Amino acid sequence: MSGPISWEKRGEIAVITVDNPPVNALSAGVRDGLLAAVTEAGEDAGVKAMIILGAKRTFIAGADIREFGKPRTGAPLLDVNNKIEFSDKPVVAAIHGTALGGGLEVALCCHYRYAVPSAQVGLPEVKLGLIPGAGGTQRLPRLVGVEKALQLITSGDFVRAGAAKELGIVDEVGEDLVEGAIAYAERLVAEGASAKRIRDLPCTADAAVFETFRKAIARRSRGFKAPWACIDAVEAATKGNFEAGYAEEQRLFKDVHDSPESAAQRHVFFAEREVAKIPDVPRETPVKDVKRAAVIGAGTMGGGIAMNFANAGIPVVILELDQAALDRGLAIVRGNYQATVDKGRLAQARMDERMALISTTTDYADIADVDIVIEAVFEEMEIKKQIFAKLSEVVNRDAVLASNTSTLDIDQMADATDRPGQVIGMHFFSPANVMRLLEVVRGGASTPKTIATAMAVGRRLGKISVLVGNCHGFVGNRMLHGYSRQAGFLLEEGAMPEQIDKVIYDFGLPMGPFTMGDMAGLDVGWRIRKATAHERSSNMRYSTIADQICELGRFGQKTQAGWYRYEDGSRAPVPDPIVAEIIEKASAEQGIERRDVADQEVLERCMYQLVNIGAQLLDEGMALRALDIDVIYIAGYGFPAYRGGPMFWADSIGLDKVLATIKRFHEEVGEEWRPAPLLERLVAEGKSFADFGK
Ligand code: 3HC
Ligand code: NAI
């Protein structure tokens, strides 16, 4: 046979190998080849049993996601699965790497499953806005029970071979993939084992299970379509025979497959992988091996960043001004770990291991031999410059020197050193031990090795690293600034915080700008606004409402009052007449006649700022591709994955429509709505953000 499938006889066992790098996805050629191989082996009188396995790094990792949304070619997966399942000769799936989605569904059509200990199995379709569409929702509950199947299918979590055996997904675990599976198949033949079909097993559950499950996932699945369809499909498995349940699964699969939510989530899947690709920093760029790290500053961010290193098993030393600051910082780190232990999500022994990886010092000599330093001290250029100068005096010549600054110019810090090529921004998000996003800020002199190392360190820390340019606020915060300003202006024009927050929440973000402000604390921004007031041009529109709120000592949740008020011990925002009064007075002072602001306008005023500034950033080269911006907003700002990120969302509306609205705002609202030249160019050329740079 040619193509991605080959098979050979090992004694009486047919070994069928899938070789379709990188992950042996079920592309058309794989389906055709599997169908032919199982047919041939089935007709070969010398074959008593078959094994299906994957070549190189993995078993089959699922359907070929790139084929979704395209015209269908090749044999349907259903035909392949039926051929396997109805084979009279026992078929064994021999699993290493990952058996995911359609890959696990193929394995579930095999009559037995053998796995090496490191193998993992799962049905992660839900993460792509899909449901398992090749019988997974019908076979898995028959095998492991309805509740466990619901848990696996709605979370998309992977299970290791040992646990999979306990669940009954895997029948046998052995060290050697090929020889072990052959020995297992030979044993089955010798024992006269029959072709065991999961479809023949019963599937029952109490109807209440499904309602309980729907309630349990309601919060995390808000706005998503697929998790609900997953539950419906499993429920169908309990309502009739296999064929009827399977038909319902197919109907639900088609429904989610054709949905904008799934198109968006598939975009996110590829975008999260694409951000690692940097045109002038090829994959083979050498990367510094990071064995030991240092963090300067044990404050909010420094402590969280140190936890990231410890979690990844990398020893880290924190440097501070004095012992008291170190003690304070370390106590917070310990408290964070302890809270996780108390919730049963981390073993005490793991916590102890991680704490043991974190050491502290006030002496620069102790960080001389580290491979990377991340500076996280106060946001003041002079202090940062002094630190970078000191670092270049004492630290290892080839270490990477990074700053966690959220706004300052990386190049000025680089210029304070004798090695500007090794200086880079690594902008973590708060809380740094939780948030997935890392903006890697490329300085004018950052070398490819420095960039590749920072990106790789981010990955090791479990972050999604996105490369951005060196400008005020970088990508994420520069866009957010425009969004927040519009929210403030909408207050002056007639909206109230609760309306704006509801519109943004209903759109899918975890919370709107005012609830967010109250949670984060309003005083920091206020202090910055006061300090930079002299830089503001007098003809720039400025809303004073936020300042007036702070002047009353209302700093958000921590003072039980901010944009909202908070009852004792509660974090639920309650609209406050005092705030309404301040807002109405501000409108009057500005000479603005308050009006009813439609929800649609609230949405467009906030979100189209993200889009317009995003377009400017692309044009300036601050973001490499529109998808980089999408990943930043999903991983760092809670933008709903089922909308694909702000730029994908704008493409899905149609850039001509978005531009027309932005032009209207430009006339009606103000200069901050001047359309980004890139947006106008793309519309003139009939293109979308996805075409940018192609
Ligand atoms: N289809 C097409 N391409 C895929 C793919 C798939 N199912 N899975 C991975 N790839 C590609 C990636 O895009 C990447 O391509 P690139 O090198 O050009 O960027 C390459 O394979 C390697 O992937 P990763 O960088 O993610 O490699 P890792 O080793 O980190 O992870 C993995 C491997 C765990 C298999 C991970 O890729 C993964 O989770 N893949 C998706 C698995 C999945 O969701 N399967 C279900 C698909 S839907 C389905 O099966 C429907 C069915 O029910 C009918
Ligand atoms: P913080 O005020 O909580 O901590 C700063 C720490 O730096 C303090 O513990 C202080 O003692 C220490 N420090 C000050 N000068 C020092 C010096 N010369 N040497 C050693 N230590 C020194 O500040 P936070 O919030 O952790 O911010 C730190 C940096 O991270 C800033 O640049 C900030 O812009 C950035 N950042 C902050 C985010 C946040 O949400 N707080 C998010 C992303 C970045």
Image (spheres, helix red, strand yellow):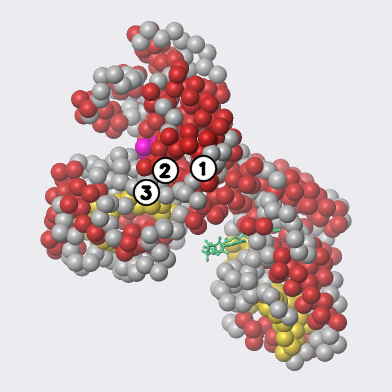
Dot 2 alpha-carbon crowd within 10 angstroms: few under 14, some 14 to 19, many 20 or more: many
Residue highlighted by disc 2? 618
Residue identifier under label 3: 468
How far from the left and from the top, in percent, is residue 435? Answer: 42, 48
Kind of residue at badge 3: Val
Query: Given the image, on which type of amino acid does mark 1 rest?
Result: Phe
N-term-proximal mark, 3 vs 2: 3
Is 444 in front, or is 693? 693
- The residue at the point 51 percent across, 38 percent down is 682
Closer to viewer: mark 3 or mark 2: 2
| Residue 34 position within the rendered picture, expressed as x and y whole percent measured from the top left | 75, 73
Q: Quadrant of the N terminus?
A: bottom right
Res. 73 visible in picture? yes
Which badge, 1 or 3, is on the more N-terminal residue? 3
Classify mark 2 as within 8 Å of ligand 1 or not, answering yes or no.
no
Residue extending farthest front: 685
CA distance for labels 2 and 1: 9 Å
Question: Which residue is identified by label 1?
Answer: 689
Q: Within the magenta stretch, is there residue 514? A: no
Q: Compared with residue 428, is residue 113 higher up or lower down, i.e. above or below?
A: below
Q: Main secondary structure of the magenta part?
A: helix
User: What is the C-alpha distance between the residues marked 1 and 3?
Assistant: 17 Å
